Structures are given as C-alpha cells and as structure tokens.
Image (cartoon, rainbow, N blue to C red):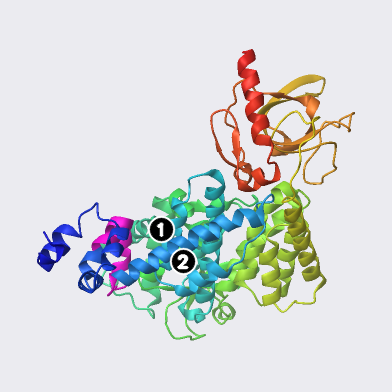
C-alpha cells in the first residue's frame, strides 16, 4: 500500500505518532517528498507529542507556561541546546585537567541566561543526564553551578535595582539563603510555614471580644496596632517558641537560612525580625528596619505616609518581641536599606574567617562564597571586590571570576589584578605541562588507576590506608600542592601522587617503597577522583581521556600487574 494513499489524519494520529517512531525517522520521512515534508512540518500536535516523548510532561508543562506556538521549532532549539551542552562539558576536561578548578569560558553560560525563559532549565535538565562517567558528571556539575551562580547574580541585580520601598526583606533573605547554598531553587517550605504563623495570628484576633479592627486594621490607630503586635508576639514567641541565638555564639549557617529558621523556630535576630516583619505586613502593619545603637530593630509605623509626629514602637525580637515606645528622634530616623542589612549579616562570617581561618588553605575555600556575595550585593564597594580578589589569588581559586569582578569595579591596573592574571597564567602552564606524554621507565613499578595500600609509620606505630595512584615521577619532584609525609630518606626512587579518603589532607606524594598493590581492589571515596578517572571497574580506576594521553603505557602495566597478582593467588 502506498503511504500517501492513507488519510492525513491516519498518518498523523496512528502512524507517525507511534512511540517507536523516532525523531530521526520523522526527519527521514520529511526528506522523501514535498507532501510528507509539509504534512509533518506543519503538524503542531505531532511535534508536541514528540517533545513529550523525548523530555517528559514536566518539561512540556514548563514550556506551556510560555505559550509555545510552534513545537517543531522548540524541538529543534532543545536538540541544538542538548548538543551544545554536551560539547561544552566535553571540552571542560581538557582545559581544566589536572587542576579541575580552572574556570572555563562563561560565554555559553551568559548566552543561556540572556536567552531567558526556560533555556536555563533546559540546560540544567541536560546537565543532569550527563552522568555516564565520573569525569563528565563532575564537569556537568561545575557547569551547572556556574549557570546558577550567574542566574543568582542576575536575581540580586534585579532585586537591588528596585525602589527601597518595594524591596521585600523576605525575598532578599531567600536570595541570601540560595546564594550561600549555591542553589537556584527557592526553598519550598518557606511560604507554608509563614502561612501557619499568619493563620494563627488571625485566629487569635478572631478570638478577642472586640475584634472588629482585626480584619481591617487602620495604620493610624495606635491602640489597635499595639494589640495586633501583642498577638503576633503571642503566636510567634509564646506559642510557637521562636527564639534568637546568642550573637557572640559564632557563625552557623542554619541560623541565617530563612527556611531553617522557620523550621527550627530559632535563628539570628535579624532573620527572626524579617519573619516578624513579613507576618506583620500580611495583616496590614508596616514595620521598617532602623539602626538603633548599632543594632537593627524594626519600627512600627501606623501610617503609610511618612510623618515624624506619628507615634510608634520599636520591636526587639531578642526580647520576645518587646515593644519600646519610639521617641521623636527614633521616629524620624531613616530606614536601613536592604543592601546594608545583608552586608551586616555577611559581616559575621567574614569576621569569623579573618579571626580564625585565615591561612588554612583547605578551609579557606569554604569562605570564598561570603566574600563573593558581598561583592554581588555591593558591586560599587571596591573594598569587597579587593578582599575577594585577594583570597582568590592566595588560594589560586576562582581566578577568572575574581578577574571579572575586578574589571567590573574598574580596578584594571590594581596590583591585585596583575597578581590574579599571573596566577591564572601559572595554572594554564601547569595544564599545558600535563599534556606532555610521560614515557615509562623500567624502574617504575606501579601504574595510574591502581588501588593501593599505603603503609607508613607515625608515632612509632605502623598504619595502612587505602589509596589510588593518580600520577608518578621517576624520582622525587618537590610540590607545594602535594604533601610529602613522613619525609622519605631515599629521593632517587619513583614517587606517586595518591588520593585516599583517610589520608592526611586527602592527597599525598609518596615513595614507591611505601606502596603495595591491593589484593583485589576496592572502590574508595575522594572528591578529586572524577578529575582523573571515568569509573571504577571492580579492580581499578579507569583513567579518563586526558589521563590516558599523559600516561599511555600505564593501561597495559596495570592489567599485567593485576593478572600476575591473580595468578599468584
């Protein structure tokens, strides 16, 4: 039977739409003749079905929000984006190995963000599917993190560009929490937990004998406003047990994450105050932050128009929502900006780092995010950019990002800019050196990817730790990054760089005499395995393309060593 003899309805709904018909099949059919080309090309319902089959209903529903009119064009866009994402991730390994932390070009990320709408979510979905080996999965996550960091930067820019009277401190607190966690998704529990508080306050209002003011509180009624504040205090502090942590108790992240504060009903005073302000706002009361002797307190203003003669109260959440009558001086004091509030929150972790963690490189990377967030919130303050650049340079970490922020702040000729560029050049030189093939010498016994037992003596006792070899040298080569401990006596023997979960600092440079091949090989855990290997095959770790190119002869040596060990056993 001739395919074209069938009605179009049959072809589209019962032939071409079958699940076993692939996108490639449709494309091939379109090439056969003009009739099929036009029929398939203009069947929006067919392409919609193909989209759902390829990416699922969740992605389809996301697209529906933006009222897609041509599903074939959307399909083509998504497929081209899929290919672009895969190619971007594949190139990252070669330009980052063996450091794994040199920033790649942000051009693709910036393009995806500018495209807007669902494109970033498409990219994220494709990145999540790149998990066929450790290396791809690692760089997919690196790219995903870069994408969402840039997205959050844009959200901060949009938030801070609003008029001060329009900024919601709750929205800012959500952004703050997302930025510190590196997550673009808003915590889903914030709104439900807030509603629980608000509904309880409304219930308390309804239980009062004379509660006519409850549903329509007037801002110029001081008596009613104070009653409303008393009810908020009863709900939040007396019944639900919200409390503030001591401000001299050090920095703990959960105390500054709005979703954790609502869950645990405990946190930093400023976060409790933001919750209080949001509850008050939703029942018709206006509270605004002011500086009171160095502390951020919230002032109740019963009128929407600014009037220095209006009565009001200061709300101190540290004292269970204590209401302090405002003096005329307090009433006329300017509102503290959202930017200033979040910079004050950041001051605590930054000060903690400067006092306790400065100089501890393996811990310092965890604090970079605080310095960077300070730059994003106040890009016009060069001090924050310089502090971030200084820490990035000292760690040789996130150098491209630091250079970009220094440029944005107009600090092109600053000595710190020159230092960051020099450090970045050093890293690129190290990457280029890693591309040089390392020919094996007969004296080198072991191979990259082998699971080993590292034996050493400490405090007079013999210890053994699991590890995996990531590279070797024919004799000792001094390195600042790879620790050599304990100090070896014979420096003329082969040395190996090893990774291990229980090894001091996680990575060591050790002599061959301290290593022995593990009898059957076991998987180990280490965050840097993905930079060097694709997967564990049950006996050893299989090097990725870059590692194979650097040590091309190690594959045969590893197989031979394992076979010899099996034969002996």
Frontmost residue, 377 versus 284 = 377
**Dot 2 alpha-carbon crowd within 10 angstroms: few under 14, some 14 to 19, many 20 or more:** some
The number of numbered badges drawn on the structure is: 2
Quarter-wise, where is residue 276 in the image?
A: bottom left
Q: In this view, does 506 lie above or below 252?
A: above
Labels 2 and 1 touching (C-beta < 8 A): yes
Task: Answer left or right for 351 relative to 539.
Answer: right
Image location of residue 209, percent across then percent down: 25, 64
Q: Which residue is drawn at 50% across and 82% down?
A: 163
**Dot 1 alpha-carbon crowd within 10 angstroms: few under 14, some 14 to 19, many 20 or more:** some
Image location of residue 85, percent across then percent down: 49, 61
Frontmost residue, 265 versus 17 = 17
Looking at the rendered image, the quarter that the N terminus falls into is: bottom left
Image location of residue 501, percent across then percent down: 64, 34
Task: Answer left or right for 286 relative to 427.
Answer: left
Residue 485 in sight in this render: yes
Residue extent of the magenta highlight: 49-71
Which residue position holds label 2? 170
Frontmost residue, 546 versus 153 = 546
Q: Please, what is the dominant secondary structure of the magenta stretch?
A: helix
Q: What element carries label 2?
A: helix
Q: Which residue lies furthest to the top in this view?
A: 569
What's the CA distance linking mark 2 and mark 1?
10 Å
Image mark for residue 310: none
Which residue position holds label 1? 190
Image location of residue 245, percent across then percent down: 57, 51
């Amino acid at each position: 039977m001739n395919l074209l003899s069938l009605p179009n309805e049959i072809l589209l709904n019962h032939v071409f739409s079958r699940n076993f018909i692939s996108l490639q099949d449709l494309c091939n059919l379109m090439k056969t003749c003009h009739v099929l080309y036009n029929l398939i090309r203009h069947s929006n319902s067919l392409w919609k079905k193909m989209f759902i089959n390829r990416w699922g209903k969740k992605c389809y529903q996301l697209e529906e929000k933006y009222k897609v009119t041509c599903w074939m064009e959307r399909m083509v866009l998504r497929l081209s984006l899929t290919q672009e994402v895969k190619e971007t991730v594949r190139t990252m390994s070669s330009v980052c190995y063996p450091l794994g932390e040199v920033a790649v070009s942000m051009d693709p990320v910036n393009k995806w963000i500018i495209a807007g709408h669902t494109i970033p979510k498409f990219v994220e979905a494709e990145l999540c599917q790149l998990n066929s080996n450790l290396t791809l999965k690692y760089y997919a996550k690196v790219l995903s993190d870069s994408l969402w960091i840039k997205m959050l930067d844009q959200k901060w820019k949009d938030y801070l560009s609003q008029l001060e009277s329009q900024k919601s401190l709750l929205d800012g607190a959500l952004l703050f929490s997302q930025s510190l966690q590196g997550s673009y998704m808003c915590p889903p529990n914030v709104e439900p937990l807030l509603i629980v508080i608000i509904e309880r306050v409304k219930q308390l209002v309804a239980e009062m004998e004379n509660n006519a003011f409850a549903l329509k509180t007037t801002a110029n009624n001081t008596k009613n406003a104070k009653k409303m504040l008393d009810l908020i205090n009863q709900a939040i502090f007396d019944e639900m047990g919200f409390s503030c942590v001591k401000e001299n108790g050090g920095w703990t992240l959960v105390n500054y994450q709005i979703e954790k504060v609502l869950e645990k009903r405990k946190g930093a005073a400023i976060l409790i105050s933001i919750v209080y302000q949001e509850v008050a706002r939703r029942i018709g009361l206006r509270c605004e932050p002011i500086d009171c002797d160095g502390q951020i307190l919230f002032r109740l203003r019963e009128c929407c128009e600014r009037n220095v003669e209006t009565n009001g109260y200061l709300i101190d959440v540290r004292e269970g929502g204590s209401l302090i009558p405002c003096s005329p001086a307090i009433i006329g004091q300017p509102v503290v900006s959202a930017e200033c509030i979040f910079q004050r929150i950041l001051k605590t972790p930054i000060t903690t780092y400067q006092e306790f963690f400065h100089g501890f490189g393996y811990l310092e990377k965890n604090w970079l995010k605080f310095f960077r967030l300070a730059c994003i919130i106040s890009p016009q303050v060069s001090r924050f950019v310089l502090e971030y650049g200084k820490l990035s340079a000292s760690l040789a970490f996130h150098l491209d990002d630091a250079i970009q922020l220094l440029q944005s702040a107009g600090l092109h000729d600053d000595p710190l800019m020159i230092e960051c560029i020099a450090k970045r050049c050093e890293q690129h030189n190290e990457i280029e050196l890693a591309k040089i093939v390392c020919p094996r010498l007969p004296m080198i016994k072991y191979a990259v990817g082998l699971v080993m037992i590292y034996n050493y003596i400490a405090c007079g006792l013999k210890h053994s730790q699991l590890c995996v070899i990531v590279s070797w040298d024919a004799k000792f080569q001094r390195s600042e990054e790879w620790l050599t401990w304990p100090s070896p006596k014979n420096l003329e023997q082969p040395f190996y760089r090893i990774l291990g979960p229980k090894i001091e600092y996680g990575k060591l440079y050790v002599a061959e005499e301290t290593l022995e091949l593990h009898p059957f090989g076991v998987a180990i855990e280490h965050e840097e395995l993905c930079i060097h290997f694709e997967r564990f095959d049950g006996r050893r770790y299989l090097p990725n393309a870059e590692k194979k190119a650097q040590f091309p002869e190690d594959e045969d040596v590893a197989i031979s060593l394992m076979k010899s060990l099996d034969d002996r056993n």
